[in-house]
Image (cartoon, helix red, strand yellow):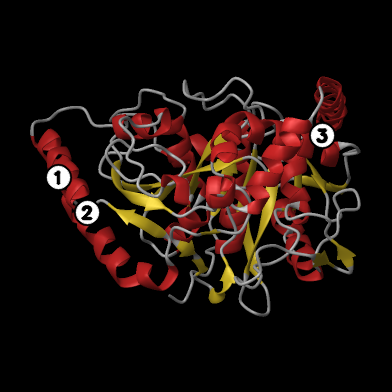
Amino acid sequence: MSASDVVRAHLERIDAINPRVNAIVTLTEDRALEEARLADERVARGEPIGLLHGLPIAHKDLQATAGVRTTFGSPVFSDHMPDADSVIVARLKQAGAITIGKTNTPEFGAGSQTFNPVFGATLNPYDLTKTCGGSSGGAAVALACGMVPIADGTDMGGSLRNPAAFCGVVGMRPSLGTITASDAAPWATLSVDGPMARTAADTALLFAAMTGRAFHDGDRPIEDVLTRDFGGTRIAWSIDFGGVPFDTRVRSLVDAQREAFQFIGCAVANADADWSGADEIFKTLRARAFAAKHGEVVNANRTRIKEAVVAEVERGERLTAAEIEAAERGRAALRERLAGFMEVYDFLVLPTTQVPPFDVEHPYVTEIDGVPMASYIDWMKSCYYVSTVGHPAASVPCGLTAEGLPVGLQIVGRPGADWAVLQLAHAYELARGPFPPPTL
């Protein structure tokens, strides 16, 4: 098919489905068709093409896109038109991807529920009364509904993995520093850019382009890169994750997948690492990051920004040097403990989220299995503990609840073992079989 055919097909899908789910909030139809025409001309002239040649992509509305509305989900930036693309957007364009629009996100990406005062809420395509998760919720829904084949996201405390789990797609948080962007702040030691798609192979394709490698015709098929023998691979299987509460539906669906990993040759053993201190470490460093990145805007527009973001900035501004130092020392100790744990095990597998998709009218989860949640992010410990140590992690769909809601399992690898995580995700998908798409 030509790039023009592919783009038109996805535009038709967006026109048919997006009004029901509100995933793509800004559409660049004319620009995408023109980019597709130019891409087809390059092929006709026999010019080299990129790894993502002709593939439509919608960028998360936290990524700056030159001349295309970029709101960050905030009324403060509701009419913002950047002069230049972010490094990630520019890199994906260079790889041949065609920008088709922007995907919805909570304000400044804060929280794992995608809604904001500019565009409203994005709905879960498996059940329109449920949330799609967040903060890369628009991307996950656009993928699940076939409106785009690939999408970028960001992840601080689970923003790639949570919506992937809630929407039956794949989301990967790369190792810290794997995907480098020159516009990333030096203090950003929690948040990363990462790929999302419907399969591990497509996710790997986008991941390869996001790393900035110079791909062109003639490279090995991505499936060949992902093929690996997992005989004897040691997996730590954690359904309780050191005492973190989980909904029983999540726990049972993930635990049922143990046989799939044994089928591909893995040696699976129940094991938990010592995550003590991770909660306070993450929350301290997160507050510091919010204050550094959003402090100036929040202080000038406090009444126009949601309370959760203001509270994070205020906490970050109150932090003392001693508190930040204690958090960093704690993180170093936590990383050392995890390094010892991962010397014994090649991978850690656990539930991605602690609950299935919940009512879209609820901003966050307040209780899990009888345990009250102290804040709007406490229900995401299964993701943000992993963020704290910077290991690569991917969420892969593993089943549907009795209510037909997707649940994901999380594959965590050693630092820098990003391709190994994708290889295991691919092998698991083959053992699991096709995942049911949304009825939309």
Q: Quadrant of residue 400?
A: bottom right
- Residue 267 location in percent, x, y? 80, 45
Furthest-bottom residue in this view = 403
Number of the label disc, if any, that sits on residue 29 = 2
> What residue type is disc 1 on?
Glu
Would you place residue 257 above or below residue 40 in this image? below
Rendered residue at 69%/49% (across/down): 410
> What residue type is disc 3 on?
Ile
Nearest the eye: 301 or 399: 301
Would you place residue 305 above or below residue 275 in this image? below
- Residue 61 location in percent, x, y? 43, 46
- Between the C-alphas of marks 1 and 2, the distance is 9 Å
Rendered residue at 34%/32% (across/down): 85
Element under disc 2: helix
Residue 158 visible in the picture: no
Mark earlier in primary sequence (3, 2):
2
- Residue 379 location in percent, x, y? 76, 56
The quadrant in which the C terminus is found is: bottom left
Q: Quadrant of residue 418?
A: top right
Label 2 Cα neighbours within 10 Å, binned few <14 / some 14-19 / many ≥20:
some
Closer to viewer: mark 3 or mark 1: 3
Nearest the eye: 46 or 142: 142
- Residue 253 location in percent, x, y? 73, 66
Number of the label disc, if any, that sits on residue 281 = 3
> What residue type is disc 2 on?
Glu
Element under disc 1: helix
Which residue in the protein does label 1 denote? 34
Rendered residue at 83%/42% (across/down): 279
In this rendering, position of residue 360 left or right of residue 368:
left
Residue 105 visible in the picture: yes
Callout 3 touching callout 1 (CB < 8 Å): no
Mark earlier in primary sequence (1, 2):
2
